Image: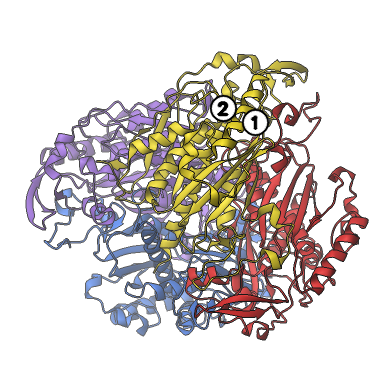
Chain colours: A purple, B blue, C red, D yellow
């Protein structure tokens, strides 16, 4: 249940307040040259404390590879890695030891397991996603020809109106929000700042565009390419929805306007299909959108439930994100890379 | 790749124009009394030819159980079943033997497998979903206490505006659309009729509400309850999006309005979480929405690509659905039942 | 739990006295030309009633393919098949409805599932192995260059003393026992005849030799090639042991005599390793030996336990095998083919 | 491929000469009190340098748990652990950098992966088994009522003749060989000493006896209890064979002597079945025997192949075991515990 993928498989462990988190990447092909610095820089994109609009918690999040790489080359055996936990202010959590925060996993974990590591949410902490970024960064280096670009496409009611074709993805990293349109980014950052000062949080969406996908990735029935991408995205903390191609808008259309007519070379004139037909990539751009709810932990007072069944007032203390979007961008990319590589390897297996 | 589930597992086979489709249900507990007529009546909800707003193809879709049930009781070994194919008008498809229909799986299958069974789409046909309905109907009979109610909540731009709490699900089956609000249903049916007469098709959404879910279903990381539900729904032909609880609307909100405050008994005052927190059910109603694009096969002329790379004019012939929604309602319910039962059994495994 | 394999996967169902048994082959590469008659002829090797030394039950065991093959070529989607049950003399089993036969699965099934289909052993019947022979025959046609030859190497205390290198496998099918040495076969057949007349049964061993195996099949840790072969063989009804290469004899040796010294071309001068080193094939012949206990159902009186906890006298009635070995030869080959093909496909997946 | 188990799952990584080896235990029930010292003491039974008849390499093999345990109790989330590598004399291996040792995995790894970590065999090193001992020690503490006792039952041609019923397992740890019969142990130790002094190695067998197994563990078809035990044992380095109950001897018997007649309470008068019938435990003692070939690395000169295809003379240098049996005893027990617990949890899942 803590394993992701069929052939390129990541198995993970770790709580935000234990010694370390980490994982094992199994099924990584042998002979791949890995740039460990590039992997670390992907982790740096996700780490806390990068800017004023994310949590001020400071953690270096340094990945240590323990196996599977010899002289910079993958050997074909499992790649074990850990990311030591630092700067754990468990004290920050002592006030919630006996309290279930609203809209958190506190209550459900307690009910499911009969216990709960209240320090930072235990396994429900988004810290787990650092493991995914490591594995995704490995995957990215294997399928280098595929370009994966995620970016923040809305914050609350502020939407990036431009279609992705008009965006310059090289600018995504140029602002702290990771929205490639500077003007919109500025407004969104301002909005988050305002929300943060009020001790509140805000939701939004991330769009991901994947180019140069080979035709034929995905399986017809239960492992449709978009179903696996959807499951991956819905695994990210705070995600409430997933749509690809025309998505929910497509549900309002008629077939005569929705169908993507062909060009003679097999490409299509429009791409409402979002690069996937019948669960299998058709070579056009894949694009999808992921909805994130606002972070549940507020820096303002709200009512919570304690383990005695009493309603008590509480206020978030630690150092939390007013908006998860900027740090979620590399996570969306990482999971996308893992899914795509898995299907590439699966396709290879059938080449007899 | 043709297997669904971890413990309660369905493996399927079959093309729409072969001898039969079918499947194997593995991991079904022993000693369960099965009402085979009830299973058949679920299949009847999905079958073609039920009404004027779905395909006029006539198929009885009769399930035959071959194993795993002895004197009406499950024995604990695999339940094998087949649904013979009837009324196959392969001739209806001869005109597309060499043609890739726009927005179909024709092109991607051909590219992936180097061949294609053009008769009815082969494995990409929605006929496969009949297998799912069988397995889902079995699952429903095991988790009888959980109520699963899906219904059509929009057709094109027509939306059922009432929140689900105001609906009487016992009326869902009272009209051919499977929308529990008669007035809205009438408008939607009229719309579909109009679209059908124009040789066109139309999209829409299905909402599913699940009540009496035990607390604790779902796994923390990659098998979050909503991620598995999402993957399941995204496996249905023509689905473009999935959202649960507040969904994409939640992405526009702030934490102070989105958080579900507790009652003293552990229930919550609101339920924007959609019954799932941290990937685990919290006992509140689960609800989600699924977006279906319009059917790609039109009864009007459109341009297609042939295998010589030429653009040719074509027109759908067979007997196709102008709108998949009415027949998709039992499919959504079936997959939901399978996912929930799987997690129930998984939870049992850990009770040591 | 009723699925075998990682990429080339067989999932099965069926009891000996239901309508049919059958299975689904998933992960079969597309574009493979299948000779269905050859598959049937493998089934004929396993079927009952072939000769005087096996059960006299008459069943045609005809496989019907329901999907996945179009115009004689695999399409890449699941191959569903059934083998209808015929000639079911359920009456033959009425005398054991309330009786647990010694050394059968009757007692353990009853305890595990709280019920038991007493007719022919239900799922514990060796009839299931017909499904394996179908899938194995498909696999054989894909890895045609690999030669898999199993044969009876001992019956009771009669051993085929010749090393396999001195045998002519083309003669295995020339006698009803499937032992390629005519003289030894004659003695063994005589022995079985004698045992059969006494209403008794007898055990023995099957040896399997696999030639032309590519170097590199098998995985280092839990999926060692010999571990997967061993698991497969131990899945066959009545099997009590498995050894490969030097096997249990190797445990009596010293390293200086056991090590296989190299030739300059990477082959080895001896092959006590049995073609596998560190779990991975080295290109030399793979050979292993499988131990079968005597069939538990006797045609002479013995004591059994009834469900009231009383010891009662019983005598087998149906039509049982005095020795399973001749019919087990194609089963051993079928499972070997499935394991090898699975590893071939797995190896392909890593070729990036 | 580096994952073992269905519900109680161990995934591992690590080479003998990297930073650390380790693993992730997934599916461990919540709320289990774990005695970490007991886990360490199981590891100590396996560690090198314990006595004169095993390798003189000194490693403390200290396990560090990184997650999944909170205040001594399992939390239900994955248990991550590492065992740092120490005392790595890579220099000991420099002489084999370009040499394939006979009957080692050197050649097959090189062919499979196109590279090889020559230092200590990389992933093919038996050091991996330390991970298994950790997971097995966790499993043992969960199924405390089941008694698992392995012991050395032969060394070369010296056999422990007594049946297991006459042995006192509390004496297994009283000698360095782990054979519960002192007299036989002394002879075996003497034999190993002699072999060691000659720079040679020797094979042998380990027998394992499992008592108090609940009735009903194991699955009917591909996950028969003995098939999973067999696969597990065949995963241990140097294992060439596995037999349970009557094993290869049973293949020489007739049914009338082999059948285990019942007592009125459902136990059996004899137990040639080895506690398993039809793949499912019947409550009687499970016992099986595992064959280990002699270690391939000799401290005397032998011929090897270098990567230029030349035959060269070589002599083992490092510090190797003259006989793996004493250190393999806890490994056999650990894998047994993991298999049994996995089936216990699987059985729980079906209790609806």
| Residue sitting at x 21%, y 40% | A119
Q: Tag 2's secondary structure? A: helix
> Residue D122 shows which numbered tag?
2
The N terminus of chain B, quarter of image: bottom right
Q: Tell me the residue at 57%/70% (across/down).
A: D262
Q: Nearer the viewer, residue A136 or B241?
A: A136
- Nearest to the observer: residue A282 or residue B272: B272
Sequence-earlier tag: 1 or 2: 1
**Residue situated furthest front in the rendering:** D183
**Quarter of the figure that contains the C terminus of chain B:** bottom left
Residue underneath mark 1? D109
Marks 1 & 2, CB-CB < 8 Å contact: yes
Q: Is residue B314 above or below residue A207?
A: below
* Image location of residue B229, percent across then percent down: 39, 60
- Residue visible at 17% across and 57% down in the picture: B260
Q: D51 or A298: which is nearer to us?
A: D51
């Amino acid at each position: 249940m803590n394993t992701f993928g069929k052939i390129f498989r990541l198995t993970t462990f770790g709580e935000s307040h234990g010694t370390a988190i980490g994982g094992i990447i199994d099924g990584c092909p042998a002979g791949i040259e890995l740039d460990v610095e590039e992997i670390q820089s992907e982790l740096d994109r996700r780490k806390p404390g990068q800017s004023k609009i994310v949590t001020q918690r400071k953690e270096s999040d340094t990945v240590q590879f323990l196996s599977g790489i010899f002289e910079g080359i993958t050997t074909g055996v499992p790649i074990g890695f850990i990311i030591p936990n630092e700067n754990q202010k468990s004290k920050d959590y002592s006030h919630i030891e006996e309290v279930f925060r609203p809209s958190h996993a506190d209550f459900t974990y307690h009910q499911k397991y009969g216990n709960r590591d209240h320090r930072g949410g235990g396994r429900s902490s988004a810290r787990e996603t650092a493991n995914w970024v490591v594995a995704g960064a490995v995957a990215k280096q294997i399928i280098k020809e595929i370009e994966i670009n995620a970016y923040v496409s809305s914050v609350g009611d502020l939407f990036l109106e431009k279609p992705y074709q008009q965006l310059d993805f090289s600018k995504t990293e140029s602002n702290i929000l990771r929205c490639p349109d500077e003007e919109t980014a500025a407004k969104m950052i301002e909005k988050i700042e305002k929300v943060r000062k009020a001790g509140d949080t805000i939701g939004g969406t991330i769009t991901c565009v994947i180019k140069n996908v080979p035709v034929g990735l995905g399986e017809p029935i239960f492992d449709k390419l978009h179903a696996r991408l959807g499951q991956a995205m819905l695994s990210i903390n705070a995600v409430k929805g997933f749509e690809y191609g025309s998505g929910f808008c497509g549900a309002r259309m008629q077939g005569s306007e929705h169908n993507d007519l062909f060009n003679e070379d097999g490409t299509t004139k429009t791409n409402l299909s979002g690069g996937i037909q019948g669960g299998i990539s058709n070579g056009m751009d894949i694009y999808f959108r992921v909805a994130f709810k606002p972070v549940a932990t507020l820096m303002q007072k709200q009512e919570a439930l304690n383990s005695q069944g009493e309603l008590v007032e509480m206020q978030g203390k630690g150092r939390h994100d007013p908006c998860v979007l900027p740090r979620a961008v590399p996570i969306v990319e990482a999971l996308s890379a893992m899914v795509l590589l898995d299907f590439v390897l699966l396709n290879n297996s059938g080449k007899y």
